[in-house]
Image: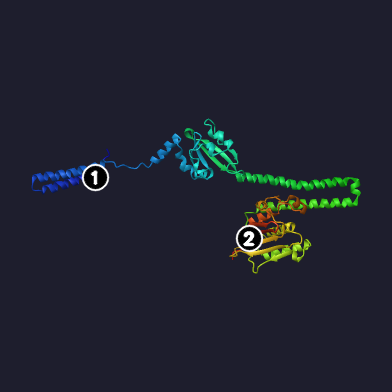
Amino acid sequence: MNPISPFRLIFAILFIIGGAVVAAQASEALTKIIIMSAFGVAALAIMALENRTPPQPDINALERQKKRLLYEGRAEAYQDVIDPITDPILLIRNAKVAAANPAAKNFLGHHIIDEDVRVAIRHPAAADRLANPNAEHTGEPILLVGVGSADQRWELRIHALNDGLKLVQLSDQSSRYAAERMRTDFVANASHELRTPLAAIKGFIETLENPDAGADEKTRTRFLQIMYQEADRMQRLVEDLMSLSRIEAEKYQLPSEPVDLAELVSDVKNVFLNGRSKKDHDFQVLLPDNIPMIQGDYAQLSQLLHNLVSNAYKYGHRGKPVSVSVEPNRNSSMLRLSVTDQGDGIAPEHIPRLTERFYRVDKGRSKSIGGTGLGLAIVKHISERHGGRLEINSELGVGTTVSVLLPTIKS
């Protein structure tokens, strides 16, 4: 029994005294008794209310229930923990999916609850480990290739919880494996591109060391010319590799130099007309009046345009002009710099890969006309460093337009 508070005890005593005063004023003895009894009962009720403990909600009930569920290994105790996780998470009991977070349902399907885990995750590397109740789980990653799509790479980790419950985590590693594959391909391609001219140069040197071949002036001149071309090819490749490395190192540094695209286009046009025996009608320029300035690196933007025009001349039809145009968007917040050739065009399946390093649509033709295979990769990185975007549109038998959208300086 709880002790009566002093306030309620004093209130009850005063209530009884008040009843006695009222009863004293009554004329009949029976009335006095009734009044005294009524006030006494009321006082007793007040004290009884003080001792009655009203039902209070147990604020720890939910926590105790969760602890009990955790102790028993119940999957629902973990639901509010796994739901916010972005990786797919499954809880497995007796080789069946007991619970799953939204990411797992979106990836594997909303029907997976109570389904056999070997059906939910169809992969032989995971089947035995997930279904075997005696398997030991250390959390080491298990690589799953082809779950979701043929190109995806997932890592699966299994952790043992209470009472036979298992937590299964799927982590998408596709981008990491793709980056690693690109790095490996890049090293292999760069080594191949350097090894080929080196082998040619070495072979011609060995031939010229022969007194008979070296003494023949015509043979010697032809071999030296080929050696010079191969050495020049190696030099351009090394310069492009260094340029690409430098651009990647600076990609988080937004250029701040104001650049006039009209002046830039004019400079690049002069380089091609003077250095490549081109005529004025071979290089068409379409520029509007009062072009806004852009914020950029003049040297890199010059390299970008030079690469695009060089590709247009290489892959366009002989005698057909190359067009360079600049066009502002609707609110002049960006400028579209476009280079168009009139060539064979590019098949749609090749366009997404054109900016990959050393990727070539026609390897035989590309090598015969020169080029390092890094031109569009450099263009893409320069565009991204300037906060811009690269677009490639092509039609077979008509030609190709490569555009770069660059933000203008805000006035």
Amino acid type, mark 1: Arg
Q: Is residue 298 above or below residue 51?
A: below
Q: What kind of element bears circle 2?
A: strand
Query: Which residue is under mark 2?
Result: 406
Query: Dot 1: what SS?
Result: helix
Q: Which residue is drawn at 86% across and 52% down?
A: 222
Residue 344 x %, y %: 72, 56
Pinpoint residue 8: horizontal percent, then vertical percent: 24, 45
Q: From the viewer's perspective, is 148 left or right of 233?
A: left
Observer-side mark, 1 or 2, equals 2
Say which quadrant the N terminus sits in.
top left
**Residue 175 image position (x, y, % from top left):** 61, 46
**Picture layout, residue 269 above or below residue 51:** below
- View extreme (left): residue: 28
Residues under numbered marks 1 and 2 in contact, where contact means CB atoms less than 8 Å apart: no
Residue under numbered circle 1 = 8
Q: Distance between the residues labelled 1 and 2?
A: 81 Å
Count residues near mark 2 (Cα–Cα under 10 Å), then give few for <14, some for 14-19, many for 20+.
many
- Tell me which label, 1 or 2, sits earlier in the chain: 1
Amino acid type, mark 2: Leu
Label 1 crowd (10 A; few <14 / some 14-19 / many >=20): some
Extreme residue in the front direction: 397
Q: Write down the quadrant of residue 123 in the picture.
A: top right
Task: Name above or below for residue 377 compared with residue 62.
Answer: below
Q: Residue at x 19, y 46 (%)?
A: 15
Mark yes or no: residue 349 visible.
yes
The answer to which of 340 and 28 lies nearer the viewer is: 340
